[in-house]
Amino acid sequence: MQNKTICNLFLLSLLLLKPCIGNAKTSNNGGFASTSGTHFVMKGRPFYTNGFNAYWMMYVAGDPIMRYQVSNAFQQANSYGLNVVRAWAFSDGGYRALQISPGNYDENMFKALDFVISEAKKNGVYLILSLANNWEEYGGKKQYVQWAKDQGQWLNSDDDFFRNYLTKQFYKNHVNAVLTRKNSITGVMYKDDPTIFAWELMNEPRCQSDNSGATLQNWISEMAVYVKSIDSNHMLEAGLEGFYGHLRPDRRRYNIGYEVGSDFIANNQIPQIDFTTTHIYADEWINGADDNAETTFLQSWIASHTQDAGSLGKPLMITEFGRSSKQFSSAQRDAYYRATYTTIYALARSGGACSGALFWQFLGQGMDNFRDGYEVVFQDCPSTSSIISQQSRRIESLNNPLTMFDTKKLEKTKDYLGGMLT
């Protein structure tokens, strides 16, 4: 079942996913990542991604004793051929906050973020930096709403973050503070630093008080225009999980019951959004499903979003995926990683919009306080690490114009996938 589905996805991609190579949408001056149709471009060449999430980087860098974990993470990324890391550029209120109160920043924490960016550059790794959180961890929209309440605003829910003029101004002020920050180590302003692959408006934005999608659509539109008014160098993505909305009701069957006020199609149609994103947590989204059901879901989820990203004329990146070791054995998790990576590679190799994935999450040894079940510690997970490394080699083979749409190699891939049926 699993192998047959992968092969069918590949063959389907040849019919439905057409290469879209055109003029770069985002400026590529100075080595900044950009898009060309449904593909990423780096320094004039195709750029496919394989990487990980490490949301904790700025927080950990704020502790001089633990700062080596950040350097170690980028060194391991380099050694495993991982080229993109996603991390937080926010921490609003609470312990070790970047933004202590609206517009009031802890310089030591900003220096910690400076360190993260400088270490990424030193190791040849690119960063996706998220600017806010939907969830209350590290502050999130809940903290913004509370700050507005403290200034006399009458707000009824955390979703008012997307509607209230003051919370929106707080957010814009934070965007401006981060994008115009001059790195104390490199001397380069963030908005001028090509080490940053892209900005993310928010981690997993949801507005479940308005499932029509209008509230979130308006917020993404407004904030995307604002980000681009400050920084025209970098790409921008919304931070979406990929749930479908009312614009494509036929696609909502993939939501498996989730209605979160976002719309993969409409949100990504916004001109200032440069590429599309999804997250995949089949073990959380499908209660009681067996391994085959979860694998089938992830393959159809990736394929449908790849097709739709192609129709939008923008690349797709899976910015979070994983499987919890609290519920599954190492062998089961490895099988899930293999299925995810094989599907992504087949679709990417076919010339479709799928550009790669970032697993959730990387941890170094000794970071037990950050364990959530999804962590991958390379030294402790040799089999998983081997699968990740293999995917890096396959992805790197695509980062060559001669292999991008090589018919002979395409046929070899079809033969390989077809052979898996026997």
Image: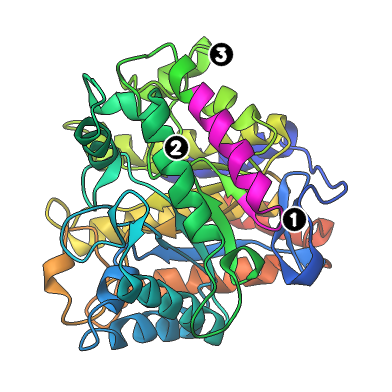
Is residue 263 something that shows in the picture?
no
- Residue furthest toward the front? 152
Distance from label 3 to label 1 (Cα)? 34 Å
Span shown in magenta: 217-235
Q: Is residue 384 above or below residue 218?
A: below
Q: Which residue is mark 2?
A: 169
The answer to whether residue 85 shows anywhere in this view is: yes
- The numbered mark, 3 or 2, whose residue comes first in the sequence reads 2
Name the secondary structure under disc 1. Answer: helix
* Residue that mark 1 sits on: 410
Residue 199, how many percent across, how many down?
54, 53
Front position in the image: 294 or 232: 232
Q: Circle 3 — which element?
A: loop
- Residue 247's tag is 3
Left-right relation of 183 to 58: right
Check disc 3 and give the amino acid type. Leu
Q: Residues within 10 Å of mark 2 (few under 14, many from 20)?
A: few
At a point 27% along the width and 57% down the height, the residue shown is: 333
